[in-house]
Amino acid sequence: MRHALPVVPLALTLLLAGIAQAQIVTPLQADEHTLLLYHFDGDGDTIIDSGPLGLNGAVIGGEVARTEGIVGRALTLADGQAVTIPTPEALRGLEQITVETWFRTTDPDPMHRQRLVLYWEHYLISIFEGGRLTGHLYDQDVGKFIARGHQPIIPGRWYHTALTWDGERVRLWLNGRVEATLRMSGTINPVPGAGLQLGSAGTDSFIGQIDELRISSIARPAFPEARRMDFCRPSETLLVSPGFARMLFDPLMPAGTGPVECTATLGDLSATATIAPDDLQPVEGSDLVAGVSHVELRIPEGQSGDAILAGAMSYQADGQTVHAAREVPVRIEPVVPVPATEFRAAWTHSHRIEEPEDILARMEASGLNAAIMRVRRGETAYYRSALGPISEVPFENETLLQDCAAAAKRHGIDLHLYVNNFPVGSPDSEIAQQMRADGRWQKNSAGEDVAWLCPSHPANLELVEAAMVELARDYDIAGVQYDFIRYGGDDVCFCDRCRAGFEERVGRAVDWPAECLAAGALHEDWLDYRASLITEAVRRTSAAIRAVNDDLVISAAVFAMPPEQAKAGVGQDWALWCREGLLDALCPMSYTPDNAAYEVTVSTILDAVGEYVPVYAGIGLRSGSGVMRYPEQFAAKLNTLRRLGAPGFSAFCVTPPTDAPETVLIPLRETMLAGDGRGEPQPD
């Protein structure tokens, strides 16, 4: 079954009044910092390097096509095709770098990982599962630094991407804007590798077009042509009727430009906004200015189907009128009728709540009926816990949880409390370091301590259980939730206790840890064993919770991926927990902004466990995957959930300070969040 949106090319024009079309994107040029440069304008299977090294590439996987690109012609790769390029010393051990290219994927599968530029264990640019752009850099010690983008990559659109490193900071760029940044020092890995590739001949092949690729020995500070090309873009491409459409404008123009008229059009709908000259700000290091605006359109009831959302701008420059226009394919769906009964929750964080009355009143005004509040991380409680070991009382409020529970009742909000079960909350504290000395932290395959509590240690299991039971027993709440009820990754835990338990399970001594790793003979048995430790913690704790308060809802926030992947990757066998009745509800952390990937993910989880427990799928309101600033972004995900038959949602997150209730949720109150979701009649 295909869940992806159709691949429709984006159209872009820039016109000067009275003269021919002007070219926004021009061919990249070689300068003193250029190492490699490919225009892809030739014919045949030899890919000509126009840079100083003359490193021509060779095609593998069959004959490639050349088609119209963003400028001139582009290299078109099919599944299994790639270009291999020699990698002399000049491409290794760099102290600065820029890898940049234009690309357009035509792969409709949102879960297919695609490699754009690949020099393994040196530098990579990829499109990861869920359509997120990702950049990898490896330092001189082969340490891996990953920059993860947020904006979904939509098939059929041209994008510019760059991965830069200036010796201190890695930056991942998309269309001239920084998507992600992180620190890195030293040099890029100087050891020879398997060679540079464009695309990949393996399972991670890139399907689509690549144009204008350049690798430089400096970190280029800006990409103005990419910004000019992307002068407007929609806030959301899956729209609902009735609802909103919005075009976001942030054009670059020459200094001295007059007012900029920005217009958005969707069928018969049209609106205009103006960026005044005083609102245009100079762009550092250039003779350009930039401005910001957005144009909102209200979609009436009765609209549906594929459509075109167009954006246009015009301004005066050097005595001439410059006009630019862009068309983006969108889909309009009718609003699914609001169910009478629906779980409508938002995650929040107790340590940020100074005024429980304020945040819970705003949740009620948003149409929500549940709050899932974090109150503990490992050994650190953010309330006055009788357990300790560490209680950090936010805002000196000794009765925080009681106050939150009372405010929740006043506003018709069911309060659920959640715990980050296995991470160490305060790693540098004296107590946490004593836990480390006592062997309670996890260890990776190299024998290094990892700041997570090991699930094989009896004292850690006692803490996980006692923390959840304290909440269930002592507070007037609707439920408790497991979070981080898993490992931090696939390279833990290899402590002596885990080794002894595993050897007892398999009935012999183990070549440790080699037989447990990916290529080892006991790898699958090892994955089953470590997942069983997490499952045993859930069995034990859920039984203890039900013993003190059988009326509570026990839920878990889990990785939003196929069950077998969650089990293998982090030891989280949540499908088994649902089948065994250890949980009353499941809250997958499905935060991806890509609509096709979101639908696939939620469908997979509903198919896996929907017959056993209600699935309240996550919506990434303010998450590590991005920030929703407009109601149409939330509406797209909510409509998808209702169309799939999900009985509710949980948004991450509504935590002070935030304006999300007012900017994103309350505008949907009448059309998509009407009533209280409890099936009760509402007062007039």
Image (cartoon, rainbow, N blue to C red):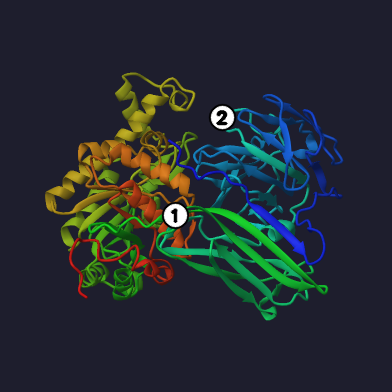
Quarter location, residue 300? bottom left
- For the point 76% across and 47% down, which residue is it? 71
Please give the count of numbered marks on the rendered protein. 2
Give me the disc on residue 304: 1
Mark nearer the N terminus (2 vs 1): 2
Which residue type carries mark 1? Answer: Ser
- The front one of 137 and 74 is 74
**Can you see residue 147?**
yes
Task: Find the distance from the CA under tag 2 to the CA under tag 1.
Answer: 36 Å
Structural crowding at the residue carrying mark 1, measured as other residues with C-alpha within 10 Å and reported as few (<14), some (14–19) or many (≥20):
some
Residue placed under numbered mark 2 in the picture: 203
| x and y, in percent, of residue 665 in the image | 38, 66
Badge 1 element: loop
Label 2 close to label 1 by CB (< 8 Å):
no
Q: Is residue 273 left or right of residue 665?
A: right
Q: Position of residue 167 (x, y in %)?
A: 71, 52
Q: Relative to the observer, which residue lies in front, 179 or 89?
A: 179
Reply above or below: 579 against 640: above
